[in-house]
Amino acid sequence: MLSVEEALAKVLNAVNVLPAQETPILDALGQVLSEDVRAEIDVPPADNSAMDGYAVRSAEIVKASTVSPVVLKVIDTVQAGSISKQTVTTGTAVRIMTGAPVPAGADTVIPFEETDEHDRGTRPESIGIRVALPPGVNIRKAGEDILNGTVVLKAGQVVHPAEVGVLASLGKATVKVYRRPIIAVLSTGNELAQVGKTTAPGQIFNSNSYSIAALVKQYGGIPKLLGIAQDVEQSMTDKIHEGLSSDLLITSGGVSMGDYDVVKDILAREGNLNFWRIRMKPGKPVAFGLIKGVPHLGLPGNPVAAMVTFELFVRPAMLKMLGYTSFEKPGVEAVVEEKVENPDGRRFFARVVVTRRAGKYFANLTGLQGSGVLTSMSRANGLLIVPEDTAILHPGDTAKVMILNWEGLL
Ligand code: AMP
Ligand code: MG
């Protein structure tokens, strides 16, 4: 049996970062830059006011105070988006709004609150300055955010909301990022009925296509739902061929030892099969191979096993295709609050509810751990990792928990 790490290394070895694509900045959220982004302008482009107030010459107001304000003639008002044609000369000031370029001659901005504007009424002809401010105060210098010619974002960086904003502040509508993987999702099984339809006797609804496609979306991929293949070689072969225009094909079911588990046979015939029994629970049987160069991961059919093996093997593969260089799922050390048994020497990913109390994390099982009990996955916010050589965790022991959902934990 392979260890989780050995299986993961083989999967990662078979996938590569995808080609880069010029992408609208908002769509690039969560994607990785394939090249440095260099500024072609200063941001801000000109010295501008950080306050609503009066642009003045600082040398003229050195004696200004509340008791003896320095009175200046107001020669213009300038708002953000406009440029004053006036030059601030001796004895004058320009009324200025936040974001408006500072007029020629002025070197400091006195906020309204530091003037007697209130006593003079709206748009006064002259203004009393009540405070002395040195040059540069309340002025945002041209290029103080970004200097023209500098590298603002580096290749390999992930585009987060702030990066989207920075790109926009540079006037860029698109950016070059590694493209998102298109991931074909195929469920197998004669027992499966399509959601929205009714089930015949003996049928269950196909949930795996949806949980898997949701995971694909969550991690930045584009799911392509191929629907349901019957447990017959022809049906499955046709569907699998449909998946070969994608970057990765995920199937669920049909990889166990049952009479109708034909996914392995097809992989063996159409491509090269690596059938793995992985030393983990849930999710022991996983098929992996390449069909005409397209990696195919055959996940187990049990809904929980399918999701857990996705987290362990598909997510890192997707992240690699997206250009990420770190694939580890973040987790915490938690105190286990009840006994957890792991008798069969595999790595057990137990569904747990993690809580945080007084800065410490605690983990409790979600109840029934059967790998068909999908609601236990929905109740869980983490997977407690019980090592292969740990047969039992006692209350009070600590163990690592892979966090599935951080809501309420930070
Ligand atoms: P298999 O690996 O095909 O033997 O499937 C294992 C178990 O998972 C069986 O009980 C299946 O009915 C169930 N199962 C397989 N595929 C799905 C699916 N797409 N949605 C829900 N349950 C499934
Ligand atoms: Mg099946």
Image (tube, rainbow, N blue to C red):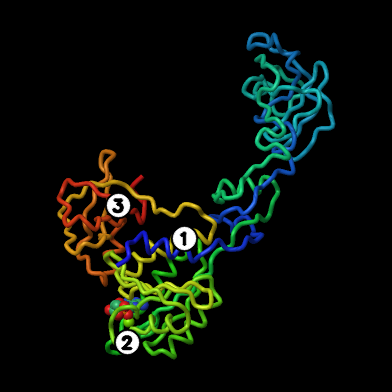
Q: Which residue is mark 2?
A: 260
Query: Which quarter holds ligand 1?
Result: bottom left
Q: Is residue 337 left or right of residue 44?
A: left
Which three-letter amino acid code belongs to the residue tagged 2? Tyr
Q: Under 8 Å from ligand 1: the CB of mark 1?
A: no
Q: Which residue is mark 3?
A: 401
Q: Position of residue 48 (x, y in %)?
A: 71, 32
Secondary-structure class at tag 1: loop
- Residue in view at x 50 percent, y 74 percent: 224
Q: Is residue 177 left or right of residue 253?
A: right
Q: Nearer the viewer, mark 2 or mark 1?
A: 2
Which three-letter amino acid code belongs to the residue tagged 1? Tyr
Q: Nearer the viewer, residue 270 or 378?
A: 270
Q: Position of residue 148 (x, y in %)?
A: 73, 39
Q: CA distance from mark 1 to mark 3?
A: 19 Å
- Residue in view at x 49 percent, y 66 percent: 14
Secondary-structure class at tag 3: strand
- Residue in view at x 73 percent, y 20 percent: 127
Q: Nearer the viewer, residue 165 or 226?
A: 226
Q: Position of residue 92 (x, y in %)?
A: 80, 20
| Sooner in the amino-acid sequence: mark 2 or mark 1 | 1
Secondary-structure class at tag 2: loop
Which three-letter amino acid code belongs to the residue tagged 3? Val
